[in-house]
Image (cartoon, helix red, strand yellow):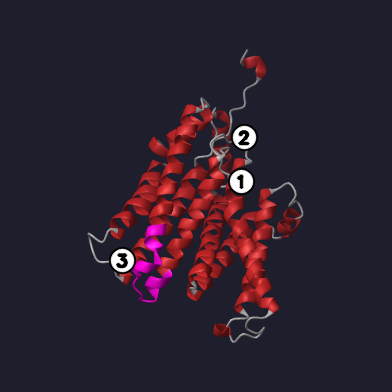
Amino acid sequence: MTSARYDQLINDLKSEYRPQREWAEGRGAFLIYGHFLVGVAAGGWLLSRYFGSFDGMVLSYLLACLGGLAHLVNLARPERALNMMLRYKTSWVSRGFWGLTFFMIGGLLYFLSRSEFGAPLGEGSRISAAGDILAIIGSLTMMCYMGFVYTASKGIPFWNSTLHPVLYIAYAIRGGIAVLVLTLALRGQELGGESGLLELWIGVTAVVIVLWVLEIQGAVSSGDETAKRSINDLLAGRLAVYFYGGTLLIGLVVPLVLTTGTIAPLSASILAVIGLASIIGDFFMKYSSIKAGVYLPVRLPHLHR
């Protein structure tokens, strides 16, 4: 441990409300990158599969690969992943690793049965169908597990919310729509009104806004001072610039204004900005909410009678 990190640890331990840093700083920051990437990948695969966008599926698979690498970097020692995966009965982290594994294997089998890759396994084969199902199961698992990982953290009240899993699922769907929109834009294609993609994005975004309001209101009204500290860090403290500038301005206001078409017609370039801004906003949501985690204070009974 470096001198700076040691001093930071001592200062944190002296503070009554200690911010968690294990999953947010140094090597731990790769956990944020990993969760962000696999969440977008899961939503992107399912939406691209439904709308028949092969390019979107390829992009989603590549994002999942990057997310897997980020998780391995976070673990420091890759062999830890094998030990972690054995605890699937009790650990949501383990279930997430299994979901990513299913997705990677299933997606590869699916690609190898597509004509775009020469179909070495044969189009329409049983292996192709098995890969398709496995990738879908993996995607659904990746979408669901992340919120439960944080909800299970009893020592951090802000994370210990029943709304967290729903919020992460909604963000995965929103990210998936953004991937699909971005893919179409990179292809130079305009979005037909019959696709309903922008309307779906607006609908999911509305759900995300409601969930965020309920999450904040629940933390404030809970009476838990630690949860209130997390909300203060988000709205008026050390993370306010990321929350307002990244999550709200870039992730919500910019794409919502652009979807109206009042500033410029919905061309391919505007669609690219909408998709990219939405994805950037989703990253800042995960970054700020994870960084906002504050541990319950340790109070010795003989000092608080």
- Give the amino acid type for the residue marked by disc 1 in the picture: Phe
Secondary element at tag 1: helix
How far is mark 3 from mark 2, CA to CA?
A: 43 Å
Residue indicated by mark 1? 148
Secondary element at tag 3: helix
Q: Is 194 contained in the magenta span?
A: yes
Residue indicated by mark 3? 270
Chain-order first, disc 1 or disc 3: 1
Tell me the quadrant of the picture where the C terminus can be found.
top right
The residue sitting at 68% across, 54% down in the picture is: 95
Residue indicated by mark 2? 155
- Give the amino acid type for the residue marked by disc 2 in the picture: Gly
Secondary element at tag 2: loop
The residue sitting at 40% across, 48% down in the picture is: 206
Where residue 45 sits: x, y (%)? 54, 66
Chain-order first, disc 1 or disc 2: 1
Mark 3 Cα shell of 10 Å, populated few (<14), some (14-19), many (≥20): many
Region of the chain picked out in magenta, as a range: 183-200
Most common SS among magenta residues: helix
Q: Most extreme residue toward the front, as rendered? A: 194
How far is mark 1 from mark 3, CA to CA?
A: 35 Å
Chain-order first, disc 3 or disc 2: 2
